[in-house]
Image (cartoon, rainbow, N blue to C red):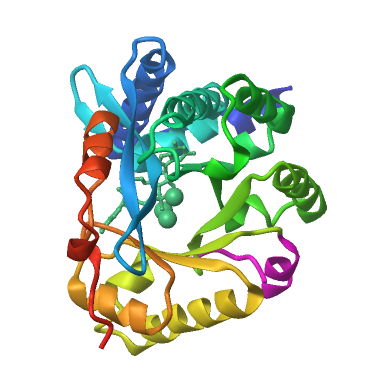
Amino acid sequence: QAKSQGRNRICFFDPRVQAEMAERIALELDLRSALQAGELELHCQAQVGRSGQLIGGELLLRWRHPTRGWISPAVFIPLAEQTGLIEPLGQWVLRQTCELLGRWATDPLLAPLSLAVNLSVRQFRQKGFADHLIDLLQRSSVPAHSLKLEITESAVIEDVEAVIALMEQLRALGLRFSLDDFGTGYSSLAYLKRLPLAQLKIDQSFVRDLLTEANARAIAHAVIQMGNSLGLDVIAEGVETDAQHALLGRMGCHAFQGYRFARPVPLPDFERLVYHWNPAEAETIWG
Ligand code: C2E
Ligand code: MG
Ligand code: MG
Ligand code: MG
């Protein structure tokens, strides 16, 4: 008894660590109510094909905090994962996404677009995830192929068999999977061969260093060639410059996403962007 108490007692001597802890707890409390309070919003970033055409978008979560302003998902998604809040939060994202695709289905310009959503490991592996998603798709009469699910390598390294079975089940319905941040995780090529993926997403770190580092260039090139030989689509994220765009295009990359084309914007702005899209501005001469 005494021994276990002693072991569990934690002392903080560093006031900075203590302040960080307090900050985290405060943010966590706020996050609990953010969903109810309507502080979460989905923004959308364009995805562009080889001839500059708009092929779809990626939905990215934003939190408009009442006193702190906009908080990045890079900050609150890990927090939501640690606390379990990711489950209601992830369900909210999927519900919003299906409702949005349902509304788009009757619009000639919006209907052909596909939307990608990010799934966190915990959300994806939550009990009843597939049934819940299937139910949402049916209720909003969204064609499953309009929805792309982005998972990361960390979602597949544990319990691979179960994950593959889940992915196969969803793929059979027409849903497509994209492997996000590809090249930064720990998955092996042996898994890659077995996962029912539709797309590889080259991580933005490789794109950022594309023109300055031979290694980044070699990795990006290898990912594109591997995707091609495995019959997968390859999209590059974080494309900011014409030079990055042109080089990736010459390497055979199929699709692009990044500030070079569009920033993530609120949904009404994204719909306007679709209506005013000019493929010529998003095209490049591969050279
Ligand atoms: P991600 O899925 O890899 O998203 C790409 C991130 O790169 C986004 O950051 C996007 O705004 C940013 N980005 C896009 N183009 C450029 C560019 O040209 N240059 C640079 N430097 N950055 C660019 P964001 O929106 O802050 O999202 C960060 C991460 O948060 C996402 O990474 C994703 O892992 C996670 N996330 C976002 N929304 C959701 C969500 O609804 N659910 C879950 N589970 N995770 C989410
Ligand atoms: Mg993503
Ligand atoms: Mg990514
Ligand atoms: Mg990322």
Residue 219 point in image, percent of width and height: 45, 81
Q: Locate the N terminus and report the quarter of the image it occupies.
A: top right
Looking at this view, is 258 or 108 the one in front?
108
Query: To which quarter of the image does residue 130 belong?
Result: top right
Looking at this view, is 125 or 68 the one in front?
125
Query: To which quarter of the image does residue 13 belong?
Result: top left
Q: Which residues are magenta?
A: 184-195
Please indicate, yes or no, whether residue 259 appears anywhere in the rendered image.
yes
**Residue 189 part of the magenta segment:** yes
**Residue 190 part of the magenta segment:** yes
Q: Residue at 67%, 23% (x, y): give it.
A: 135
Q: Locate the C terminus and report the quarter of the image it occupies.
A: bottom left
Query: To which quarter of the image does residue 8 belong?
Result: top right
| Above or below, comparing residue 263 to residue 3 in the picture | below
Q: Residue at 28%, 70% (x, y): give it.
A: 208
Residue 123 point in image, percent of width and height: 60, 34
Q: Quadrant of ligand 3?
A: bottom left
Please indicate, yes or no, whether residue 13 appears anywhere in the rendered image.
no
Q: Residue at 45%, 44% (x, y): give it.
A: 112
Looking at this view, is 275 or 19 the one in front?
275
Residue 183 point in image, percent of width and height: 51, 69
User: Is 271 positioned to the left or the right of 127 in the image?
Assistant: left
Label total for image: 0
Residue 74 point in image, percent of width and height: 36, 43
| Above or below, comparing residue 257 to residue 168 in the picture | below
Q: Residue at 18%, 19% (x, y): give it.
A: 67
User: Is 41 positioned to the left or the right of 275 in the image?
Assistant: right
